[in-house]
């Protein structure tokens, strides 16, 4: 593993992985760390650089591990700390890094801190307000549910308030997510110190960084929406300083589902997060493809501020949550719901609980085009497990579970995932997406499969630094149905052409001045013809082309 490349994340391809759903090594029906270890060769072959593991801590799993009951251990379903050490070693030996989820904002209500915090001291009189437990102040309590009324509710389908009454404490406690996830009180120095200990523990073990969950909400202040407060940034900067000082080369990835102008502050001046998800770009990729119009993508990238050189956006098409439509207008949301979630069961909160392939009705051309956009627009791309083979989803399962079903390795009824009779979730038995139709083994054996195309896309992306460090320059080709842009870095220039429409398109675009010799299609390795500085191409529906322009002289 190249330890010296501290900017590795700028050119990395990430793979988001649900350990419970990946591979079950001990036949108990749950994927585990040893199982993941057995699949590292697979991931290496796919070509990904860094795995992001969804939470693996002990948890009552009311929010699939985002409700942590112990920050210093591994959920027994997944294995042990020794298994995790072995996984890290095996991944690093293959040049694969691992980041893990770090849930800063809240714990589970089953966490011993919260259980202690609820209790009143024996000598405390009924209704008294001076609890003895030092943990009371680890959480945010109130005698009324009227404080911080400007803070929005995030899980609108389930929660009616950010306050829940606790009969044991005789007070309300504050939570931005499910009621079983009480928010930690960052005004308490002891809480702030705990988080440093947690970071130190996992970084000492060898993790390559953290995907920091729900960071905008750490502090609460009256008369604000309790998001992005200066106190929050000041604390996050301290965490970053700690990482840089003691663990250079490890990264912090910010989850803030907000506009790029607001997320920009989480990069600070290169002293806060290394990376941040670009949430608003994602629905606009779907919107652009639905409307056959590049405008939404171009618009959101124009709204995206410049970030410090050493920082990077993280881009994605799908993840373990619903496809979030928070960062679009009401009208746009209705349009996307109609197009991509016609059945009400497909909708959740302000989003769509479907996987990539079903969103595109399994149209291979559209799936590939979406990946073409993801891998050529600015940012480090993330692939969600299973989407490399076009897995489907299960709408019978509640909440977001339908996009977290067992990875389909083979065409057997258990998908080659586990030998157990009962699995944590059923293997898809849908006619179109069942393992007999969609599985890793079959796609690896078929050179024309989606898996092979994605493997190629990943490999090519990594060869061209213009795709990771270059700016984007839009090129007018006479129609907004074709997204054409140039990515350039250190003399390397690529021209990317994506036909967003369902019909063939002829495009004519002017090449940058000075191009006299060969233009090569880096996907097919064929030359592309041009005359007099003009490139004329015929594109099939949803076709994409990645062209390498010759180095410019002088
Ligand atoms: C964001 C995570 O992606 C989601 O799965 C989780 O439910 C919330 N944060 C709360 O932790």
Image: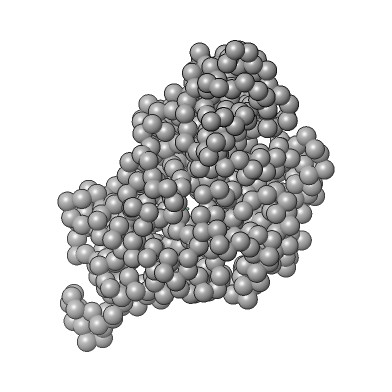
Q: Position of residue 314 (x, y in %)?
A: 49, 46
Looking at this view, name the residue that lies furthest to the front.
554
Instruction: Name the residue at 18% across, 75% down.
Output: 129
Colour mapping used in the image: one colour
* Residue 283 percent coordinates (x, y): 47, 34
Compared with 429, 31 (above or below) is below
Residue 495 in view, yes or no:
yes
Q: Quadrant of the N terminus?
A: bottom right
- Residue 520 vertical placement versus 455 (above, below): above
Vertically, is 110 above or below 510?
below
Q: Quadrant of residue 514?
A: top right
Residue at 63%, 59% in the rendered image:
96
Which quarter of the picture shows residue 186? bottom left
Question: Residue 84 at x, y = what percent?
Answer: 61, 70
Q: Is residue 417 visible?
A: no
Residue lying at 49% horizontally and 22% vertically, measured from the top left:
475
Foreground pick, 246 / 212: 246
Which is more toward the observer, 333 or 169? 333
Left or right placement of residue 466 versus residue 118 in this view = right
Point out the residue furthest to the right here.
445
Image check: 59 left or right of 193? right
The total of numbered circles placed on residues is 0
Q: Quadrant of residue 500?
A: top right
Q: Is residue 55 left or right of residue 172?
A: right
**x 42%, y 48%: residue:** 309
Q: Position of residue 9 (x, y in %)?
A: 53, 53
Tell me if residue 375 comes above or below residue 334 in the rendering: below
């Amino acid at each position: 593993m190249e330890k010296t490349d501290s900017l590795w994340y700028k050119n990395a391809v990430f793979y988001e992985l649900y350990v419970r759903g990946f591979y079950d090594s001990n036949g108990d029906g749950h994927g585990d760390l040893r199982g993941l270890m057995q699949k590292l060769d697979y991931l290496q072959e796919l070509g990904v650089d860094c795995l992001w593991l969804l939470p693996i801590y002990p948890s009552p799993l009311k929010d699939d591990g985002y409700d942590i009951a112990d920050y210093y251990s591994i959920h027994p379903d997944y294995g042990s700390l020794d298994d995790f050490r072995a996984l890290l070693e095996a991944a690093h030996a293959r040049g694969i890094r691992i980041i893990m989820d770090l849930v800063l904002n809240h714990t589970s209500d089953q966490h011993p801190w919260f259980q202690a915090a609820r209790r009143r001291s024996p000598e405390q009189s009924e209704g008294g307000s001076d609890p003895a437990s030092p943990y009371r102040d680890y959480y945010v309590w109130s005698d009324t549910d009227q404080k911080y009324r400007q803070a929005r509710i995030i899980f609108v389908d389930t929660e009616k308030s950010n306050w829940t009454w606790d009969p044991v404490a005789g007070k309300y406690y504050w939570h931005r997510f499910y009621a079983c996830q009480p928010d930690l009180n960052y005004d308490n120095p002891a809480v702030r110190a705990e988080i440093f200990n947690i970071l130190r523990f996992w970084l000492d073990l060898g993790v390559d960084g953290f995907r920091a969950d729900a960071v905008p909400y750490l502090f609460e202040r009256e008369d604000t929406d309790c998001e992005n407060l200066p106190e929050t940034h000041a604390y996050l900067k301290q965490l970053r300083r700690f990482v840089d000082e003691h663990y250079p080369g490890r990264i912090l990835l910010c989850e803030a589902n907000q506009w790029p102008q607001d997320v920009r502050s989480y990069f600070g001046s290169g002293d806060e997060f290394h990376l941040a998800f670009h949430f608003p770009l994602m629905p606009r990729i779907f919107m652009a493809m639905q409307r056959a119009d590049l405008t939404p993508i171009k618009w959101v990238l124009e709204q995206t501020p410049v970030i410090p050189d050493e920082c990077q956006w993280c881009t994605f098409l799908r993840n373990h949550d619903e496809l979030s439509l928070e960062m679009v207008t009401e009208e746009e949301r209705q349009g996307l719901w109609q197009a991509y979630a016609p059945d009400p069961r497909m909708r959740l909160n302000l989003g769509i609980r479907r996987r990539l392939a079903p969103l595109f009705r399994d149209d291979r051309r559209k799936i590939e085009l979406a990946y073409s956009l993801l891998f050529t627009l600015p940012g480090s791309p993330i692939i969600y497990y299973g989407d490399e083979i076009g897995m489907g989803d299960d709408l019978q399962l509640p909440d977001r579970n339908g996009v977290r079903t067992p990875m389909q390795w083979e065409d057997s009824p258990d998908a080659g995932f586990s030998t157990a009779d009962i699995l944590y979730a059923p293997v898809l038995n849908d006619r179109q997406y069942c393992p007999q139709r969609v599985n890793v083994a079959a796609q690896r054996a078929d050179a024309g499969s989606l898996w092979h195309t994605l493997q190629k896309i990943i490999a090519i992306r990594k060869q061209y630094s213009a795709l990771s460090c270059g700016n984007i320059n839009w090129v007018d080709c006479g129609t907004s149905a074709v997204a054409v842009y140039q990515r350039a870095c250190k003399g390397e220039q690529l021209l990317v052409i994506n036909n967003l429409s369902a019909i063939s398109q002829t495009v004519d675009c002017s090449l940058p001045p000075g191009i006299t010799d060969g233009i090569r299609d880096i996907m097919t390795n064929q030359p592309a013809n041009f005359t007099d500085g003009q490139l004329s191409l015929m594109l099939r529906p949803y076709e994409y082309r990645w062209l390498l322009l010759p180095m410019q002289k002088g």
